[in-house]
Image (cartoon, rainbow, N blue to C red):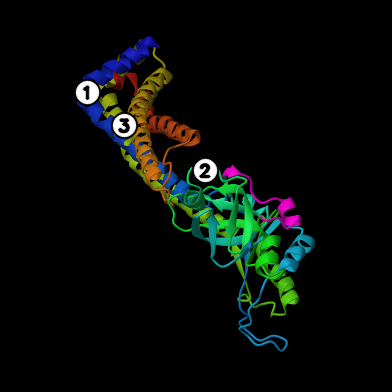
Amino acid sequence: MNELLLEIWTSVRRNKLRTFLTGFSVAWGIFMLVILLGSGNGLKNGVLSNFGSYAVNSIDLYGGRTSKPWKGYEKGRHIRLNNNDIAILRREFPEIEEVAAAKWLSGCTASYGRLYAQTWLKGTHPKTQRMEGIELSAGRYINEEDLRFYRRSIVIDEPLQRLLFKDEDPIGKQIKVGSSVFTVVGVEKGDAQRGNSSCSIPLTTAQLLYSANDPEVSNIVFTLRGITTNEQMKDFEQRLLRRLAAEHNFAPDDESAVWIDNTLERYKSMMVVFGGINLFVWIIGMGTLLTGIVGVSNIMLVTISERTAEFGIRKALGARPSSIVRLILTESVMLTAAFGYMGMVLGVAVMEAVNRCLVASQQVSDGPTVFLNPTLDIGVAASATLVLVLSGLIAGYIPARRAARLKTIDALRYNK
């Protein structure tokens, strides 16, 4: 093995410039592949981060307006979803896993002591926290007890905490929202520098205090299970629309009466787009790497041409063709792997530097992003390593086969 490595090192030293230029093309190819893969990964992470912890298998329902007359009703009638629709979804659709609803109320003035601020108020269900990925910085979210007993519990957000409580702990404190007094049970995470604010109270309490116990809700959100194909999703949406049409007296094919916002379909569509981007990146990266592979193959052909007489002597002394093939393939793989590894390490370093800059900028601005964490995972790094090894084998195969087929007498007579 040591003799083999010594022979390869001697060959490399004999043609330093040519070896460097050829190796640089391999390094550049794998460097660009890593940069492209990292950029595609960063774009994917950035877009998906805007979902936050929102359940991707969720669907939102909103009441709309009818677009056609039906059974004596004129078109343009406003469809109002209510608590009975929530019960229907839970009872009649086994595909539905969890259901929650929200009721948005008009802006109110929230006050604590002599401090006050404007805030939006919404009534909600406890399951909203999981489905919408709501995170808390203190306390808890609305729970079932709050809902059942019409408690005046409220979850404020960080902007309202900053305005009303400064550095004081708000949990357990009472604030006045409009004409009602609520006890703060939690603080929702968010941009503390944002000027506007929204707070959550139990849906039952919101309907009782602000809507004279009217069961209307602004929207219903639910998660699905067991639906894996587009056909199943289309069938579910049609059955859902027909059932709501029977409940609210509108045409079953009137898609304007109830708006269906399908997060799962958007998520699947984005996954298809990112799959296409990833495939495109691999094609471009492999094309760039192919240039380096051709260069390595050419330099190995030149090496064989220069060492033809040497190979003839080896064969005359009893060397088997497989030993010559092993020598050529080993040199090709080592050359490709060495320079390719340099390119991969440099590419990963560049992506890590970009990631650090992104993290620093996001600490200053906590807004939405379309580019996040453009680093490579272990699977991609392993794939790139496999590409390097295969590239070396491909680059050395044709020259190795040519060297193995040399006849001993022809090789000994060869004159460069």
Crowdedness near tag 3: few (<14), some (14–19) or many (≥20) residues, C-alpha within 10 Å: many
Q: Mark 1 or mark 2, which is nearer to you?
A: 2
| Residue 168 badge | 2
- Quadrant of residue 99 in the image? bottom right
Q: Would residue 312 be visible to someone looking at this image?
A: no
Give coordinates of residue 126: x percent, y percent.
Answer: 68, 52
- Quadrant of residue 316 in the image? top left
Q: Would residue 150 be visible to someone looking at this image?
A: yes
Give coordinates of residue 58: x percent, y percent.
Answer: 63, 57
Residue type at tag 3 = Val
Inspect the magenta stretch and tell me whether residue 147 lies in it.
yes
- Quadrant of residue 73 in the image? bottom right
Q: Is residue 113 left or right of residue 356?
A: right
Viewer-nearest residue: 53 or 106: 106
Give the Cα distance between marks 1 and 2: 70 Å
> What secondary structure is found at the residue carrying circle 1?
helix
Give the Cα distance between marks 3 and 1: 14 Å
> What secondary structure is found at the residue carrying circle 2?
loop
Give coordinates of residue 391: x percent, y percent.
Answer: 39, 33
Q: Is residue 10 left or right of residue 93?
A: left
Residue under label 1 = 16
Q: Is residue 89 above or below residue 132?
A: below
Q: Which badge, 3 or 1, is on the more N-terminal residue?
A: 1
Q: Residue at x 38, y 30 (%)?
A: 392
Give the residues drawn in magenta, as a range.
137-152
Viewer-nearest residue: 10 or 203: 203
Q: Residue furthest bottom?
A: 72
Whether pointer 3 and pointer 2 mark residues with C-beta atoms closer than 8 Å, the reply is no
Q: Residue furthest front?
A: 114
Residue type at tag 2 = Glu
Q: Is residue 370 above or below residue 407?
A: below
Q: Is residue 300 left or right of residue 204?
A: left
